[in-house]
Image (tube, rainbow, N blue to C red):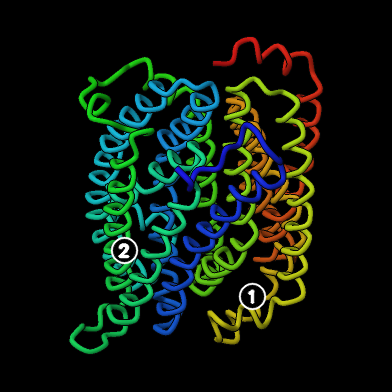
Amino acid sequence: MKKRVNLTRGDIRTALISMALPIMATSFVQMAYNLTDMIWIGINGSKSTAAVGTAGFYTWLAMGIIALTKSGCEINVSQSYGAKDYKGVKSYVQTGFKLNILIGAIYAFIVFFARDFLVSIFNIEDKDVLMMASDYLKIICFFMPFYFLNPLLTGILNGYGDSKTPFKINVVGLFVNMILDPALILGIGIFPKMGVKGAALATGIAQLIVCVLFIYNIVKNEDLIDNESMKEKFNKNYARNILKIGIPISLNMSMFCGFSMVIASIIGSFGAVAIAVQKVGSQIESISWMTSTGFATALGAFVGQNYGAKQLDRIKDGYKTAIKIVFAVGIIASLILILGAKPIFYIFLREEEALNIGIRYLQILGLSQFFMCVEITLSGAFNGLGKTKIPAYVSIIFTGARIPIAIILSKYTSLGLDGVWWTISMTSVLKGIIIYIWFNKYIRSKKFKESFDLAL
């Protein structure tokens, strides 16, 4: 019980920071999973990096599908707990678990049997890259159920107010991954050199261990599940509520991934080095977007619990506190990427062509980090209120606009590949500005006040 942060009373800054710090740390741990792979894979050269980057789009797409249950459970658990509907909390947990298992199995089946076609759509002509990407997906599919369950269980605990347990569990997974990565990728001791297959296997084993630890911690917490709730039949009403909230977020994340895959195909036309740079660059850039995503999750849980408890003023005060912190995070992230582009990128890829492209990537994307942090955090606030459609609309419209703009700037201007980077950066700026204006207008509206009469 001591692990849970009470978000409905007490000092707001303390509650938010206590909740946010472990989530941020968990985000960095998850980022470290990917960076660890990239560091060791990078030793094998740009082809291996491009292969993992290409296959990685389908684990990324999985995250969008996972949001159906993860976000729906997280928000409903937080609102139910704030409203002291403890039976509802348990029902959402067991319903979400069953939905997640079903969806994960279907996704793994499709990706496994369609993997060759899926990697072929990126316009990559190098057969070695295509073969390695297919091999990576083949192994990952066997571990896909754990990829689906871990975010769900993290979301349940976050909605409940316990962000420390996910952090501790993910740290264990990181250490496992850090040990297995060099051993399986490069072949150390008794292990054969497996290249990208080793990266997939190392990550999959780590996810399996993390899942076992999550299930153990969830099962022993009677606030979240007990013998009686485990015996309940599948409840269509709870499933409907989960999907109602989760679908806009899932659609947004899935379409974001889909749009990014089209952008990747445009980048792919510039060669394997360009794909490798985009993969590594996006991982470096995740310093800011995973930090803000962590804080958005904390703010979403805070808003959700206080919405359930019908504490309007506390929600407003929580938003004001959160946005001040996010402003600082965004500015620092922008400065780091712009001023430290060369030494940062040099850690991952040292080939001259890749390094030159990577420096421009980080400097151009660095301009938008502040606005991106604002967009992500306020999306979390909207989600906590159950208004998941609003941030989805903003994201889908402007992310989708990247495709025609990127084609024009990269193919029909002198910018070339830089035109893609400028497209991504400027649309992120627009999304941040629009969602900031929209959220401020909404919390001052009569509609916002009236929504509390309809809360749990």
Q: In this view, does 447 lie above or below 102?
A: above
Q: Name the residue under label 2.
A: 206
Residue 64 shows in this picture: no
Secondary structure at badge 2 equals helix
Any mark on residue 114, and which? none
- Lateral position of residue 420 relative to residue 171, left or right: right
Q: Mark 1 or 2, which is nearer the eye?
A: 2
Label disc, if present, on residue 357 of the rendered structure: 1
Residue positioned most to the left: 190
- The percent position of residue 18, horizontal first and vertical second, equals 61, 50
Q: How crowded is mark 1: few (under 14 residues within 10 Å), some or many (20 or more)?
A: some
**Would residue 100 be found to the left or right of residue 278 on screen?**
left
Residue at 26% x, 44% y is 110
Say what amino acid the circle numbered 2 marks: Ala
Q: Which quadrant is the C terminus positioned in?
A: top right
User: Would you say residue 375 is visible in this rendering?
Assistant: yes
Q: Where is residue 166 in the image (x, y as percent from the top left)?
A: 43, 52
Name which of mark 1 and mark 2 comes first in the sequence. 2
**Count of numbered badges drawn on the protein:** 2
Q: In which quarter of the image is the N terminus?
A: top left
